Image (cartoon, rainbow, N blue to C red):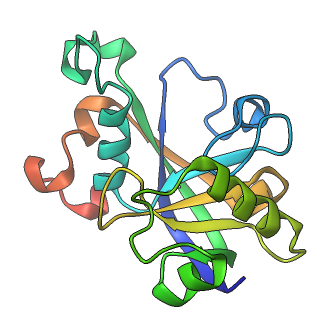
Amino acid sequence: MILTKRGGRHYRVCDPDWMDCLDTSFSRRDGGRWNAPNTYGILHLCATVDVAAANARRHFEGEIHTLFDLEPEFQPVLMQVHVRLSDFADCVTEDGLREAGLPASYPEGVTWIRTRDIGRKAHALPNCNGIACRSAVKRDGEELAVFDRATGILRRGKRFAFSSWYPPLRATGLKRETL
């Protein structure tokens, strides 16, 4: 598996009532794209505000209401997370995808059975802190899946109310430095 360096400012979409936006216990219990249930936890971070917005929208696909139908106190918040420059399994570049056994079209057509196997192999690597991956919700976006054992490389940043971060910056005219 190819390792790649990632770090800097990332974003976490959180329910406003979460006590700890960096808690991985739900991921550990339920599993997800990179981990089977009851194995290890994963913390999903978005590389950009646009990817965070796409993830927020994804939670409402097929629902009868949208993010804008929620009362403000129930709309998702955005938390900045600062990631110390560290090694992650590369599931972004063509070489990284090939080495991981994923098609160039990833994430299209790739099941969680396959990604969970890659997550297990990456988790077994001693210096691997998680997986840098293409976003499953925004074609040109990137996400970080940080292993629960590596949350020490994370530092909490500011939290932003829904009205101050969504819709994405380009639509609001906010400057990136604001977030």
| Quadrant position of residue 83 | bottom right
Give the left or right position of residue 177, taking residue 79 as reference.
left
Q: Position of residue 70 (x, y in %)?
A: 27, 12
Count the labels in the image. Answer: 0
At horizontal 47% and vertical 86% (from top left) the residue drawn is: 94
- Decide: is 72 above or below 38: above
Along the line of sight, the residue nearer the viewer: 92 or 112:
112
Q: Position of residue 61 (x, y in %)?
A: 30, 27
Q: Position of residue 75 (x, y in %)?
A: 34, 21
- Decide: is 153 above or below 17: below
Q: Is residue 179 visible?
A: no
Q: Residue furthest bottom?
A: 95
Q: The N terminus lies in which quarter of the figure? A: bottom right
Q: Is residue 177 visible?
A: yes
At horizontal 13% and vertical 56% (from top left) the residue drawn is: 170
Q: The C terminus lies in which quarter of the figure? A: bottom left
At horizontal 9% and vertical 49% (from top left) the residue drawn is: 171
| Quadrant position of residue 132 | bottom right
Along the line of sight, the residue nearer the viewer: 175 or 71:
71
- Decide: is 40 above or below 29: below
At horizontal 83% and vertical 45% (from top left) the residue drawn is: 40
Give the left or right position of residue 72, taking residue 93 as reference.
left
| Quadrant position of residue 4 | bottom right
